[in-house]
Amino acid sequence: MDAASTPLDVACQLGIVGPGLDPALLSRALPPLAEAGFRRVVLPRIAPDAPVDLSRIAALLAESGLAPIGMAGQTPDADVGSADPAVRARGLEMLRHAVEVTSRLGGDQLNGVPYGAYGKADSAPGQRAFEHAARAVGQVANEAHERGIRMTFEVLNRYETPMVNTAPQAVAFVEASGSPHLGIHLDTFHMSIEEEGIALAVRTALPHLAYVELGQSGRGALSTGVLDMESTVAIILDEGYDGRWGVEAFTRALLPGVVADRLAIWREPYADGLRVAADAQRVIRNGWARSSVGRRAAREQRAAEARTRQPSTEPVR
């Protein structure tokens, strides 16, 4: 391992560099992301009726060497937390469709918000909705596991969901799901709004934590914003997290208008997504180097290099 790399398995949100799943975008964006050190790319949610050529996307991913991470979601008329059994059934089928898409693309992880429709609510969902959603998501997580896919659910802030906002709530959701295969997805942007502290949130979720996403306060480059991302990476590593990572950023310049509106992305914090991706890798490398696990790895590497430089003490025959 050289000084410019880490052993971390990092994914980049495709939305950082452009909208949608157009093959021209993928052809342009995937190779530079792979060259920057990313191992995976997080794709947008693909609706059941979307006119998408999955075979072509899978081929482009394979050519780039990047593995896909799928995305699950719900809508008001297809929601596993609904009181209406028909709406819950449609929500369940939508989750199963996301598993199918992820499998066809060759992915082994499914992220997203599978427990309810995205958006600010006027009231709390209630315990029955929580239980309905958890059981359904747990069922699909088990089905996904049978296909070699790890399903996670993202913990969002109060303005984006009323269902799961904190690490303790996420642990309760996993327990209510009944699934040993459901993983928690924490995001630093949301943690900075809802949690008592990032270290405590990671520690709480750690037994089920499967994905940590790095998102800055202003939704732009990781090196610009309120959060000290290098220290945050080091803190998370030092809490014992050794799973996959993700990088997320949004700018109105590179999002479809309807998506930008839904995410409340009113500004343009950056114009060049590939530069944001490269900046993220630099921040992550620096955070790794500051962590105790990174410092230990560097010491071990120096010691190994010193041993290879030592002259042989065996007598010449």
Image: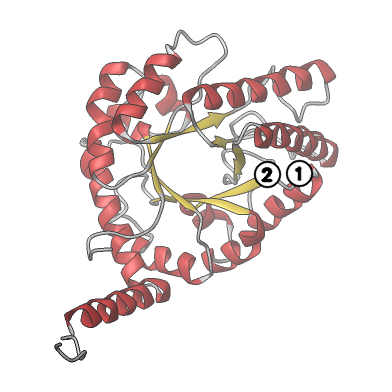
Category of crowding for the residue at label 2, using alpha-carbon neighbours closer than 10 angstroms: few (below 14), some (14–19), many (at least 20): many
Give me the residue at 36% from left, 73% from top.
Answer: 297
**Residue 205 lies in quadrant:** bottom right
Residue 36 vs 87, above or below: the answer is below
35, 138: nearer the viewer: 35
Return the x and y of residue 260 as percentages of the image width and height.
40, 28
Determine whether the residue tagged by mark 2 lies in a helix, strand or loop.
strand
Give me the residue at 59% from left, 22% from top.
Answer: 100
Callout 1 amino acid: Ser
Give me the residue at 80% from left, 44% from top.
Answer: 178
Q: Where the C terminus falls, by quadrant?
A: bottom left
- Asked if one can make out residue 20 in the rendered structure from this viewpoint, the answer is no
Numbered circle sitting on residue 210: none
Category of crowding for the residue at label 1, using alpha-carbon neighbours closer than 10 angstroms: few (below 14), some (14–19), many (at least 20): many
231, 41: nearer the viewer: 41
Return the x and y of residue 169 as percentages of the image width and height.
71, 52
> Disc 2 marks which residue?
182
> Disc 1 marks which residue?
179
* Callout 1–callout 2 Cβ contact below 8 Å: yes
Q: CA distance from mark 1 to mark 2?
A: 6 Å
Return the x and y of residue 273 as percentages of the image width and height.
25, 37
263, 167: nearer the viewer: 167
